[in-house]
Every structure is written in structure tokens, then in C-alpha cells.
Image: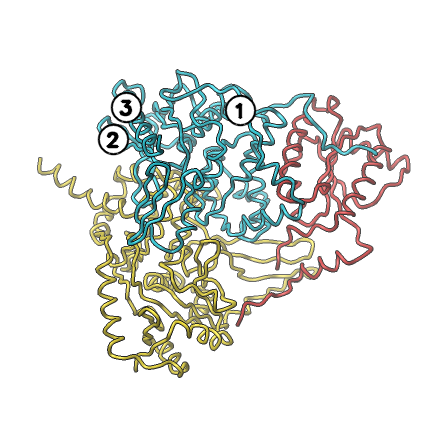
Amino acid sequence: MRPEVKKKMTETVLEEKKLDEKWEPKIIAFLCNWCSYAGADLAGVSRIQYPPNIRIVRVPCSGRINPYFIIKSLTDGWDGVLISGCHPGDCHYISGNLVARRRFAILNELLEFFGIEPGRVNFMWASAAEGERFANLVKKTTKIVKEIGPNTKFQKEW
Amino acid sequence: MENKILKKDQIGKLYNELVGEYKFYAPKNHKGNISFEQIEKPEDILLDYLNSKIPPKSVLFPKMEVLFEYTLDDKDVEITDRQDLDEKTLIFGIRPCDAYSFELFANFFSSHGNVKDEIYLKKKENTTLIGIGCNTPRTTCFCTSVNGNPFKKDDMDLFLTDLGDSYLVEGISDKGKSLIERLSWLSNAKEADLKKSEELAKKAEEAIVTKIDAKGAVKILETSFEHPIWDEISEACVGCGTCAYLCPTCTCFDVIDETDQYNKRGRRIRIWDTCQSCLYTKETSGHNPRNTKIQRCRNRIMHKFSYYPKNYDLLGCVGCGRCVYLCPVNNDLRVILNKINKIEKKEEKKAVV
Amino acid sequence: MGIDTENQEIENSIREIAKKLLSENQVDVIIGYAEGTIPLSSTPIFIRKEEDVNKLIWNNLCYINLANYLVPLMPQLCDSEGNALKIGIVAKGCVGRAVNHLAVEKQVDLEKVKMIGIRCNGIVNRSKINLEIGEKEILEVSISGNDIIVKGKDWEKKFPYDQYINDLCKVCKVKSPSASNETCVGECEEIESIHDEFADVIDFESKSSEEKWNYIKEALEPCTLCYSCRQACPLCYCNLCFVDQNLPVWFGKTAELPDIIVFHLIRAFHLAGRCVACGACSSVCPVGIDLNMITRKLEKIVKDRYDFTSGLNAETLPPMMDFKMEDTEEFMLEED
């Protein structure tokens, strides 16, 4: 038998996703507990509308973010990743976000170098009082990821 | 039965006739790495080669193999076993050393207690081996030192000898002989062809320059477990495992589970593993009996040249030489075996003085 | 001066210094390179006696980074009580960089290490030559003048030296170790910083995302995840590598493309600001993958952002062990 090119389950699902006009990206958001999570909470309490595409994971500090979380999200099939922390100088743990900032810088450059579309993984600062800022930036992220399209690069074929 | 002739420009015809019934594997060149791949068009078959980098064990014992898949339906688990074990496979162009390695594989996958590896054994049952003798062995080959020969035919179904622009075809096993009968368009071999093949066999055996006293090493290793020579032998090793991964007789594997939680399904996979990895013998308690590189390096040599002969009366090495020319730090097995052979002599000298 | 004459001088200097260090008991063991038993190779050797120094060689096939043997410390390099011996190490530029960087990460005690500095003149690209020769057996490789001569049973081929060395060696800026006279004997020069245009990386970065992904995919596709690159790297010394973790399992170990890309991506991330661009990872790869583009990108990131090059001295903190209020953050998302 000649080697067949079997159409695996994931390929069909992904093709359907790409053609679907109503496709909405799924974005995972890692928010630091003291600033960004509180900011998201404030946005909710103030009834500020923002797209429902993000799923929030609360972490104690943006410095807790291990690059494994970001890469694993991409391999698991998430279309976008958003990481948010306190503004530099305002970290509850003094310097957690400064450590994180260097990690993000290098990871961002490497992701772009490997061909992951710029805009899939985003980093931002949002403080506990900036509910509106948080909502605006989530709107922006969703718009960017929607334009890039579904994450098809890390799918395993089986 | 009569020996036949297969002309090299008839390989395409052979492929087209057999590809309908068999999964046709042959050496293929991919970016300079030769390995046994499933052939899509006969022009891809590589005929002019010394030996493949990745041994043909990768056809029946691939780097990654799915053992079974499962789906979750609420509380029920449904397991799907492998469906393709009855498909027939044909491996074309295998060398005598690699064909002999399948003997050692059969030993490993069926001899341990009452456990038989159904997946491997079923695949091997449905496999036909068409081998080609080595007219020009490499300088690193030493099959003749480990009960092998560049023209050893016993482990093949069909044996081909490269006569220049054609192959002499000999049926060895019943499977091979019935395959020849199927290929009725093969022309008969002449006396001159048979004579030429015998000459080539003799020349090939003489061309093997590396000679090692493997039997002597086996004897010395029986009493050398604690010898300080292992410190010296394992110094340069980096523990990469290339020797084990690319060895045609190494069979160790790891079993891992992969789940696709979003789609409620998963699969169990077996992947190649190596005793050179520091985690190979780590136990759940945290204790690791082979904690140092010295112990792991020693284990590999002892496994091939001491434990295997002791337990199964077989040498665990086929002399293909891959570990010699592919080791990144050139930790040459031939040099190691020669060092081991010198141990007893040194100690004898001491006793005299 | 032809490459072969340079090699002879370097070899003589290594043997002379090695003999001196051993005879004066400044070191207990010397790690160097010896002649390989097969063409296009060399093998690391551990010399403990003066009469063995003539086994030390220098040819352009010394691709292993000897600093790999310093961490984790092997029993062969310790005395009977488990204390590290005094070690001499034949150091081309990248080996020196690795030793310095390991000292910054407190894995090596520089008081116990002596670098035998040499001015490296490049390492031959084994996979490139093997690819050109094809399936014929190579029986002998030698350097004559500025040519690499490869011989088989009844054939011979010549390659121009400058074109057939590793891509990393072609742009190397640290050819001999950067260390003080106490740590390094022989050829060493204390380098403050390097100057590099990174034209090759800028050229790659101008491609579109799709093109970059396809290039990386094609380059890494033969990878079998054997982890030889990780084992040969002097800076990959973790007791438990992230791929071997199973509480939790982060990434798969199958040889499928997503697992391959993720392994190399994360290993590159772990080496940011630590990689010394020795090229050992590419030289030891059994399927001939060339990781030089990733290495060059790592050098460029830390040089452009933090003005840092690893291994130039044993004091400066590497970028991932430090942070500043004024760090660049142009990649952060901002409101429109």
C-alpha cells in the first residue's frame, strides 16, 4: 500500500474553523492578583463592556509566570495569551514584575523569531484602579488575535 | 530452486508489482540521512549506499508507536486497539548485520517470562526481508568478530548480491521462495553469475579490517564489574544516548500517556529510551542505582557483551559499527573492547612479579 | 600562514604549557583533545602524567566544548574525599567563555581551574562535508595550506577552508579566552565587549512570520529528540531537564513536530544570555541539524537589549539574573 495521507480529525476541525465567519478566538489571560485582577474586577463592577473571549487565570504576581505557561497554552490550542501585571514600581512584591518584564522581552523576541505571529502573545500593565484601561486593552487584544486567525501551528495530528 | 537475476532497471517493476499488497520500505536519502522509509515512488529507492544511519529496527519498532487509543464518554472508556497489525510489510535493501539484529529483537520481545509483545511479534510475522550483501564493508564494520558475515544469508527471506548492473536473487526461507515464484518475470541466473557472487562474498569478508576478540572480552567481563578501567572508559562520554538510539539491537522503550482533554480522548505511546539517560533507573522513592555516568557506561558494555551471552547465549552486538562512527565524542567501542581484553594480561603480569 | 602551520604552533604551545603545569603541580589533571579513531573527529582526553602530553592535539575538528565536563563534577575529577581536583583545560575562545559563565553561576571554582588559552582558527563543519561527500566512506581528512583535503579509497576532494568551517566560527569575535593571567595561561586577552552587526540575523528577521515558521520547521524536521545537543552543551547542566519532568508533564517527548519545535524554543529561552556560541550542539547532532541561527539570535537579543555578551569575565551578572527599573518595554500593549 502506498503511504496514505489520512485526513486527521484536527485538520478537518481547523479547516472548518478558518472558514467560519463567526469564529471567535479563545484567549487565556494570566492576571496578577493585586493589580490586574482587581482592575478586571473593577471593570466588571463598573459595568464596562468588554469582549467575552478571555478566560482569566489568577496568579499572585506576574513574576510567577513561567514561560512554560505561555507555550503550553499555545500547544493546547489557545488562540491568544494575555499577561497582565502591576506597573513597574508598584509591584506588591516589590520587583516581581521587573523580573517578569525581562522574561517577557526575551520570550517575545524568540516567539517572533520562530514564526509565531506577533500579536498572539501580549503583555500589559494594568493597575487596580484602571478598570477602563483593562477593558480597552482586552478589546484591543481580541481584535488583534481575531485578525491573526486561529492557532493551527501546534496541533498534533491524531 | 533456481537462482534468479533482477536487473537494476527492473526495481521499478518490482516496486509496482508488490506495493499493492505490501508496505514497501527501502533506504531513502533525506537531507543526507539515510533511513528506511515507506517509498512513494520507485525513484526514491537508494541502491548505492553503505548502510543506513537509522537502523531498520525503526520500521518494526518505530521511534514513536501508538499502543492504543481511548475515548471518554461520560464514565465509559472505550479502547481502540491497533487495527493495522495484519498489514504486510516488505523491507528492501537490508544488510546482513541488521537482519541478524531482528533475531535479537525476537528474543527480547518473546522470551521474558510469559509476556509476549503482541504488537511487535505480529508485525514481524507479516514482514518479508529482502537483503543485499555488502560488497564494500566500511572500515568500522566488525561483523566477522561477532558471529556475522557481510554475506550472511540465514536471517533473510530473499538475498540479493550486487553484481554491478543486476542482482543475483536467492530464496532463503519458504516465504522468500514463494515470493520468487510470484515474480515469474525474473530471468534465470547463469553459472558465471553464481561464480561472481561467490568471489564477491570472499572479497567482502577479506575487506573487513577491524578484528576484535569479542569472545575474549566476554570472558574477562565476567569478573570485571568493579574494575577501575570503567573510570577511564566513561570519561569522555557525554551521556547523549546516540549509541543506544542508533544501535540495531537496542530495544529499551518508555511508555507515556498523552491526553487531549478538550476532546476527551487520549493515547498510550511507546518511545525509544536509553540506559544512558540519568533518569532511566530512577525509582519512585528517588533512589537511583545508576547515579553516575561510570555505572551507565559500564551497563551498556556489560549488557551487550556479558549479560546477553550469559542469559541467552547470544552476543548482543552485530558489528554494524554505527556507535563507532556516530558517537559525538568518538568513544570508540573497538578501543574499549581492546582495553578490556588487555585487563587480564596486565593482572597476569603482576602475579608473575 | 597556512592553517596547518597555525595548527602546529597551537599544538606545540598546548603541549608545552600542559607539561609545565603538570610538572609544577599547578594542576592534577588536564582535559584536552586527542586524535580521533575515525576521520572528521577528535576525542576528549584526560591527561594525568607528563609523559602523556604528546597525546594532546589541536586540529580543526575539536568541536566538543570541554567545559561540559566541569559541571556536574565527575568522580574522575575529584579526589578520594570528593573535593574537586585542580583542573587544566585546553581553552579555545568559546570554552573560555563557558568556564567564565559557569563561574558567574557559581558552578565552578575558578581558583581550581587553569585555562590553557589558545587562539582558535575555526572548526570544520562536519555535517556540511558529509553532505557533500555523500555515501562514500571517508578514510582521511587533513589540512594543507588553506584547503581541507578529504580522501577515500580511490578518490580525493578539496574544500576551501573559509567556506567549510561552522557558520558560528565565520563570525566569531572571541577567539581566545577572555580571562586574567591568574586563570589563564597562554593566549588570552581580556575583552570588555564585542562589536557585532548581526547582519545574518537581521536578514532572517526581515522574513514574514510564515516564512520564518517554514524555515524553522524545515530545519528542525529531521530532529529525533535524542537530546545530544542538550548533553553536549556546557550550560545545560540541570539535574532535571524540563522535558523529563513528570509532575507535571509540560511537553511531549514524541518525535512529532510540535514537540520538536517546543523543545528547541524553550531550550533557547533557557540559554538566553548564557549560550556561548560554541556550536557543539550542531556538531554533535546525529542527523546534522544546524542550530546556528538560533544561537546567533540569542546573542543579538542580549547584546541589543542589555549590552551583554556571556563569558567575557567572571563578574558581570547575566541579564536573566538581574533587572533594572529602566528596562526596555516597547513590546508592551498600550491603549490607542
Give the structural element (helix, strand or loop) at label 2: helix
Residue A158 higher or lower than C162, as above or below:
below
Rendered hue of chain C is: cyan
Identify by letter the chain in yellow.
B
Residue topped by disc 3: C16
- The percent position of residue B255, horizontal first and vertical second, equals 50, 54
How far from the left and from the top, in percent, is residue A155?
64, 53
Judging by the rendered image, the residue that carries numbered circle 2 is C54
Q: Chain of mark 2?
A: C
Quarter of the image with the N terminus of chain C is top left
User: Would you say residue A71 is visible in this rendering?
Assistant: yes
In three-dimensional space, the C-alpha distance between marks 1 and 2, rounded to whole angstroms, equals 35 Å
Q: Which residue is mark 1?
A: C194
Subunit of mark 1? C
Residue C48: image quadrant is top left
Q: Is residue B298 above or below residue A7?
A: above
Q: Amino acid at mark 3?
A: Glu
Report crowding for label 3: few under 14, some 14 to 19, many 20 or more residues within 10 A (C-alpha).
some
First of labels 1, 3 by sequence position:
3
CB of mark 1 within 8 Å of CB of mark 3?
A: no
Instruction: Say whether disc 1 or disc 2 marks the residue closer to the N-terminus.
Output: 2
Q: CA distance from mark 1 to mark 3?
A: 30 Å
Comparing C112 with A30, the one in front is C112
